[in-house]
Image (tube, rainbow, N blue to C red):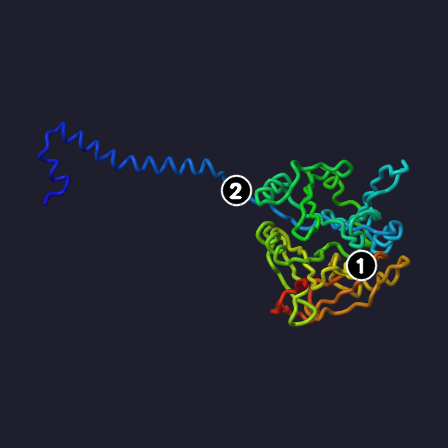
């Protein structure tokens, strides 16, 4: 039985050419069709925005019931320079200070706000957390593409000209996305106000209450690109805190888990904290002993973490907000592994 090419050698030339053209068309048309369909598909589905870099913690903001006392705590007791004092008229028309900031290093500050008695859930003194990025607008577009609620545009600070906008994690924690513009105020102050009295040069992590850990994991892992670094808890059977590492920094956030629906002011003050890293906790203890602790504030003796084997010292301001100093290494040179216990979750309500 002859194949197609053998048959065609007996055809007249014109007939042969016409049929060969038909043969070519049969082969080419599907290619054109599928190529056009693929092009249309790509045109109809633009490439998803990519996440810009997350460079670590820009700041952590706390409210306080005693503004004057807490200003002394962060400046005189902890040794940080007060680099911003923002003022505005109050309800009576008097000029008042509504925010101060304390410089830890050129990229990190601690922000302090006088408490508003009308603020919802004002027993929780953690106001918000600043995440540093190199492109705030790209981050806004990226988060919007992931279904996060974001503003229509990036804001530029009126007093401090950082670019910023707010987004909320699934547990309601306010995250301020911050970009330091080149030539801006933050950039211009680099190298200034880095006092020798600082007992730490870096905020290594911020811890905060996490009521729904599964939703938090989805947000921080799948959207923001964090990775888990370490987990442990109050007992071998329970995981009460989980460290998540920034995608483009060695800094972490610490999800503080709980089985309780509602936490007391003291519990919130313990969970919502910052960690200031040091290489010698004894130096911190000695320095603090020589300074005046503002009334109502507390400082504890150094301890050794039973899980991470790191020496630490905890002090609290007048509101009970915990400031943790921790060594950057374990006391015995060990590298303890993560817990294999179960994640603590809030108890389900009985029907």
* Number of numbered tags placed on the structure image: 2
Q: Secondary structure at mark 1?
A: helix
Relative vertical location of residue 236 with respect to residue 69 in this rendering, above or below: below
Left or right: 198, with 187 as reference point:
right
State the residue in front, 76 or 317. 317
- Outermost residue on the left side: it is 10
Select label 1 or label 2 by which is in front: 1
Q: Position of residue 251 (x, y in %)?
A: 67, 55
Lower sequence index among marks 1 and 2: 2
**Residue 167 position within the rendered picture, expressed as x and y whole percent measured from the top left:** 67, 45
Instruction: Write down the quadrant of residue 188 in the picture.
Output: top right
Q: Are marks 1 and 2 in contact (CB under 8 Å)?
A: no
- Mark 2 neighbour density, 10 Å: few (under 14) some (14–19) many (20 or more): few
Give the distance between the C-alpha atoms of the residues marked 1 and 2, in whole angstroms: 42 Å
Residue 183, how many percent across, how many down? 71, 36
- Specify the farthest residue to the front: 351
Q: Residue at x 74, y 37 (%)?
A: 157
Residue at numbered disc 2: 48
Q: Quadrant of the C terminus?
A: bottom right
Q: Which mark is residue 265?
A: 1
Tag 2 secondary structure: loop
What residue is shown at x 64% (from left), y 43% (from top)? 149
Query: In the picture provided, is 97 more to the left or to the right than 245?
Result: right
Other-residue count near label 1 (Cα within 10 Å), few / some / many at <14 / 14–19 / ≥20: some
Quadrant where the N terminus sits is: top left
Instruction: From the top left corner, tell me how far across and down residue 96 is, in percent.
Output: 88, 41
State the residue at coordinates (82%, 68%): 301
Image mark for residue 191:
none
Residue 230 falls in image quadrant: bottom right
């Amino acid at each position: 039985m002859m194949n197609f090419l053998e048959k065609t050698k007996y055809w007249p030339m014109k007939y042969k050419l016409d049929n060969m053209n038909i043969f070519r068309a049969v082969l080419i048309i599907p290619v054109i069709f599928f190529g056009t369909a693929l092009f249309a598909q790509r045109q109809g589905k633009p490439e998803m925005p990519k996440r810009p870099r997350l460079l670590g913690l820009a700041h952590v903001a706390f409210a306080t019931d005693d503004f004057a006392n807490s200003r002394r705590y962060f400046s005189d007791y902890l040794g940080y320079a007060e680099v911003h004092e923002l003022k505005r008229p109050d309800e009576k028309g008097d000029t008042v200070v509504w925010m101060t900031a304390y410089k830890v290093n050129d990229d990190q500050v601690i922000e302090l706000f006088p408490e508003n008695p009308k603020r919802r859930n004002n027993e929780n003194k953690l106001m918000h957390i600043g995440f540093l990025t190199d492109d705030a607008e790209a981050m806004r577009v990226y988060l919007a593409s992931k279904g996060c609620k974001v503003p229509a545009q990036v804001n530029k600070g009126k007093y401090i000209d950082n670019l910023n906008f707010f987004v909320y994690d699934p547990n309601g924690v306010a995250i301020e996305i911050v970009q330091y513009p080149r030539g801006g105020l933050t950039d211009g102050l680099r190298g200034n106000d880095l006092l020798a009295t600082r007992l730490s040069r870096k905020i290594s992590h911020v811890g905060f209450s996490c009521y729904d850990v599964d939703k938090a994991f989805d947000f921080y892992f799948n959207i923001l690109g964090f990775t888990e670094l370490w987990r442990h808890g109050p007992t071998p059977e329970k995981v009460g805190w989980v460290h998540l590492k920034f995608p483009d920094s060695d800094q972490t956030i610490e999800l503080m888990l709980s089985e309780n629906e509602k936490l007391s002011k003291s519990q919130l003050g313990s969970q919502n904290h910052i960690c200031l890293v040091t290489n010698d906790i004894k130096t911190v203890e000695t320095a603090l002993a020589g300074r005046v602790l503002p009334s109502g504030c507390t400082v504890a003796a150094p301890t050794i973490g039973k899980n991470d084997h790191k020496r630490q010292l905890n002090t609290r301001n007048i509101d009970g907000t915990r400031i943790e100093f921790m060594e950057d290494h374990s006391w015995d040179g060990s590298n303890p592994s993560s817990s294999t216990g179960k994640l603590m979750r809030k108890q389900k309500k009985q029907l």
